Image (tube, rainbow, N blue to C red):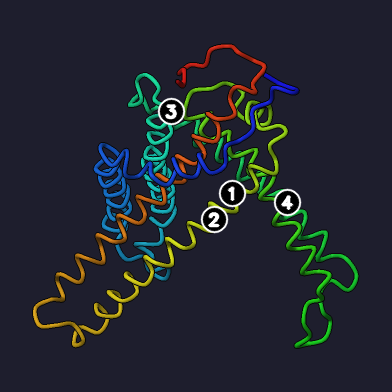
Amino acid sequence: MMGDGMVKLPVFDVLGRAFTAPFKFAWPLLPFYIVAAGFALGMIAFWFQVAGPMDPAGASQSSDVGSNVLLLVLLVVVAYLIFLSVAVLTHRLAADIEHPWQLIWPVLKYFFVGLGLGLIGLIYYGGSFLIVLGAPGAVPTEPGADVGMGALLVFAVIVLLGIAIGAHLFLALPAAALGRKGTLALALRVSRGNTLRLFSAWILYFILMIAINAASFLVVGGTNVLMQNPEMAPGGMLGAVGAGWLIVNVVVNYYVTVAGAAFLTYSLIALLPNDADVSAPEDAAT
C-alpha cells in the first residue's frame, strides 16, 4: 500500500502501547528477564573465579592471560546473546506471532543485525565528526577558548540527523526478531514517507525514558547513599534498603528493556502495510 494510501505512524498509539507493554507482558517477561540477566551475570562472575587475580609480572600467570581474555570475550558474547533473548522475546510477544519461544535463530539474527547497525552508526558519527573537527576553525587553537557556536550547531544537526536515520534503520531489529527477510531493506521500505513521525516518536520516547530514569535515580541514589553510609540507615534496616535498591534496579532495567523493544515492534507493525513485498515471513506477525 503505497502512494496516497501510505500508512502513517500513529505516534501516540505506538508510544502508549510501548510504555504499557512492560505491565502487559510482566508474565512471562519479568521472570524470564530475571533468569536471563542472572545467568548472564553469573557467566561473567564465573570468569572472575576461573581467571583469578592476574599479575602481568608473574610468569606462572602471564602465560594464561591470552586464554583468559579469549574466555572472557566468549562469555561476554554468550551472556549478551542471553540478555538479547529478552528483547527478542518481547518483539515476538508484542507481535503476537506463533511460536514466540523459538528464540535461537531469531536471537542470532538479531545479534548480527545489531552489529550491522552499530557499524553503520560508527561510520556515520565517526566520519561526520572527523570531517567537522577537521574543518578550519572548528577546534579552538587557544587554551581555554570555547568551541564556536557554528561547530556546536553542526554537531547538533549531525546528532538529530542520526536520530532521524536511526528511526528508519532500527526497525530492522524487530524485523529480525520476527524472522523477516532482508531486514534493513524492509525497514526502509515500510518507513518511507514517515521520517517526521518517526523522528517525533523517538524524541518523545527519549524524553519519557529520561523522566523515568530520573525518577528511578532519586530512589536508587537515595538507597545507595544509605548503603555507603550504614550509620545513616535506621536500626536493622540496612538489609531491607539493599534489597530495595536491588529490586528497583531490576524493575527499572526490565521496564526500559521491554518498553524499548515494544516501541520498535509496534512501530514496525503499524508500518508493515506499506510493504509492497507481501511474501510471507518466516514468522507471520498478526
Q: Vertically, is 59 above or below 106?
A: below
Q: Label 2 amino acid?
A: Phe
Label 3, on which residue? 95
- Residue 76 location (% of width, % of height): 41, 48
- Residue 114 location (% of width, % of height): 55, 40
Q: Quadrant of the C terminus?
A: top left
Q: Which residue is drawn at 63% across and 31% down?
A: 187
- Residue 215 location (% of width, % of height): 39, 67
Q: Label 1 amino acid?
A: Trp
Q: Vertically, is 6 above or below 247?
A: above
Label 2, on which residue? 206
Q: Residue furthest top?
A: 279
Q: Label 4 amino acid?
A: Leu
Q: Which residue lies furthest to the left in this view?
A: 236
Is the residue under label 1 in contact with that under label 4 (CB below 8 Å)?
Answer: no
Q: Label 3 amino acid?
A: Ala
Quick one: label 4 or label 2, which is nearer the N terminus?
4
Whether residue 235 sits left or right of residue 118 in the image: it is left
The residue closer to the viewer here, 139 or 251, is 251
Is the residue under label 3 in contact with that under label 2 (CB below 8 Å)?
Answer: no
Whether residue 50 sits left or right of residue 257 in the image: it is left
Q: Quadrant of residue 74?
A: top left
Quick one: label 3 or label 1, which is nearer the N terminus?
3
Label 4, on which residue? 161
Quick one: label 2 or label 3, which is nearer the N terminus?
3
